[in-house]
Amino acid sequence: MGENKKKIKEILKEGSIKSYAQVFFSDSTAFGILLLLVSFFDFYAGLYGLIAVLITNIIALMMGYNEFKIKKGTYAYNSLLVGLGIGLSFAFGWQSLIIVFIAAILSLIFTIVIEAFLAKYGLPFLSIPFLLVMWIVLLSSRELSALGLSERGIYNINEIYGIGGKFLVDIYQWFESIDKPLFLKTFFLSLGAIFFQYNILAGILIALGLLYHSRISFTLALLGFATAFLFYQLLGVDITHYGYSYIGFNYILTAIAIGGYFLIPNKYSFLWVIILLPIVVLISLSAAEVLKYYQLPVYSLPFNVVVLSFLYFLKLRAKHTLPLNEVIIQLNSPERNLYYYQQAQMRFKWLSYFPMYLPFMGRWRVSQAEDGEYTHQGEWKYAWDFVIVDQTGKQFSSYGDYVTDYYCFNKHVVAPSDGTVVEVVNNIEDNIIGDANLLQNWGNSVVIKHTEYLYSQVSHLKKGSIVVKKGDIVKKGDLLAFCGNSGRSPFPHLHFQLQATPYIGSKTINYPISHYIRYIDDKYELHSYDKPQLNDEVSNMELTTLLTTAFKFIPGQKLRYQFNGKKVEWEVKTNYYNNTYIYCPETNSFAYLYNDGQVFYFMSFAGDKTSALYYFYLALYQIPLGFYPELKLMDIFPPNAVFSKTEMIIHDVFAPFFSIYEAKYQMMFVDIDDDLDPELIKIQSKVSLFRLNQNIKTTRFNITISSKGISSIQSSEIKLELI
């Protein structure tokens, strides 16, 4: 029971603070605390806002809503805005407190319902619940005679004197006497207005907090407001006349939302901010004209209309010709969204692919690739033909007069991935060398269904050699048949294609092979989600048990190491999204990992960059699970995972356009004690840091894998040994 109460307190505390940060699309606790303090510049507005947040989160918990979303502040930030609005608009008293309580509940109801409705279209609910509830409160208040209007803000000097005496009044008057450019003054007032604080100091503090949280968000806030401000000037509209302190924040929030939160920030998202902001201005002006007849403020209506319309507009595209990419996994920071996207594009763009492997065992050569010289053309261009050759490049022994002279004839053909057999032809005669059966073009074939709209076909198989039948369930690597010479096949070879329909000879689709080894003389290359080219000699990667065992991290597993003479202990866990990570409780550090059975990856790191876990992450960033002597592998780190926060300040500003800093990873297999039954494998990896393409630092790691696991990692800076 005690643990449960502690958990509830933690959820309420974290969820309440992050509700403030969520107004700026953030989940930063530090930023949330700053905004909480700023909201109390008007004490009663701040108090009502906090009360509304607590009421919403408590009821959400009691009603059994998603605890993760409560902790993120997702459900309560609209209630916060409603509470701030009520606290500023009405006099303090039990009547207004009752209204806050009712409005907080209504905000939660609207939030849940609107979220569910818009989720069907993949759209956020933004601040629509706040708008609806605040308008309801304002309209109904005209009939609530006991609900007195607030007079705060009329006598600013008196209120400031009541808070901090003459000293605070002197500071306020000094600050107000400073000549401030109109643009900056209106910018800061608009920022303050987001939290119903209509003074420049509140805006300055929010601006500093926004800059600390996200340089991209701060840049977009300036860009969005500057675009709207300039548009006002060009139209000859007095921005102060239209109550900039009430509607100016629409320009700031729209710019952040479109430029870097819901879309991956880049030059095109910034361009669309400039295009859309005049539209926000027009909607703001027109909405003000309409709503003045009902004596209602515009609030965030223009922001909601433009952002939701534009996001849905993007979803209806037939082709994604411009790189305006929606954020799929929301990390609540434009920088994190950008760096995660860049990493995913380079390292994990294949996650959407069902894994597909080569349909044979051993080493084969591509005799005809895509857009082939003979048959792989038109609708059937995405296909490969494979043969086996000797050291001289010949496909056959003796004179090659008989099918049995060919090295690939009668060799195993295996399932390229898990699936169900949907088509089999097994009775077509094998051709004599030089002949071809044009009537039964594909010869003996097997088609396997892997997923909806993904099928594989292997053809020209040996007559009577197919060992599966329609309806059989097969696993990757299961024997299907033997290579033959049937159909349009003048010499033995294996035809392999991927298609969207279950028929033999279906139109081919453009689809990669998951992982394979390419042989170049005596060297090896690992290709991941790539396509073999003409004359490439390739094979599936043969896994090494020592590596697969060492890099198999199971939730609940404990890891104990000696790090520079100090004992450290980690635990393997999974999070809300079912992502696996290694956690270090001593440094509160997280190393997220992924293992697809062929290659081990570290996906991201969060925490202490002096910890043992961080060096573990750096050294083992990507490791193939099959040993190939001197096989080299290249990869990149997201810059925020390697460079310091100070270095990233400037980088973040320019990151949507180009990179100042880069971090590259290289790994190579060095030695194995026994090819057949190894007990020791040595690996070298290095991390190289670049500034404007100039190498500024390189760290090398020597890694030892033993029967106990990852037994040691050493560099010039650290020594990590398994206990």
Image (cartoon, rainbow, N blue to C red):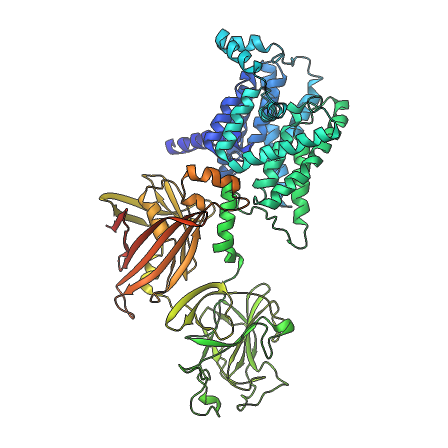
Answer yes or no: is residue 6 visible: yes
Which residue is nearer to you in this view: 443 or 382? 382
Badge count:
0
Residue at 67 percent across and 32 percent down: it is: 228
Corner quadrant of residue 144? top right
**Is residue 641 toward the left or the right of residue 83 in the image?**
left
Query: At 69% from the left edge and 36% from the top edge, which residue is drawn?
Result: 305
Vertical placement of residue 161 versus 236, above or below: above
User: Residue 173 in the image: x percent, y percent?
Assistant: 55, 11
Where residue 540 appears, x then y in whole percent? 43, 69
Q: Quadrant of residue 265?
A: top right
Looking at the picture, does residue 313 appear above or below residue 50? below
Nearer to the camera, 263 or 200: 200
x, y percent for residue 716 = 27, 49
Q: Please, which residue is most extreme toward the left here?
A: 565
Q: Kindly indicate the quadrant of the structure image that contains residue 590.
A: top left
Considering depth in this image, is 517 or 654 the residue closer to the camera? 654
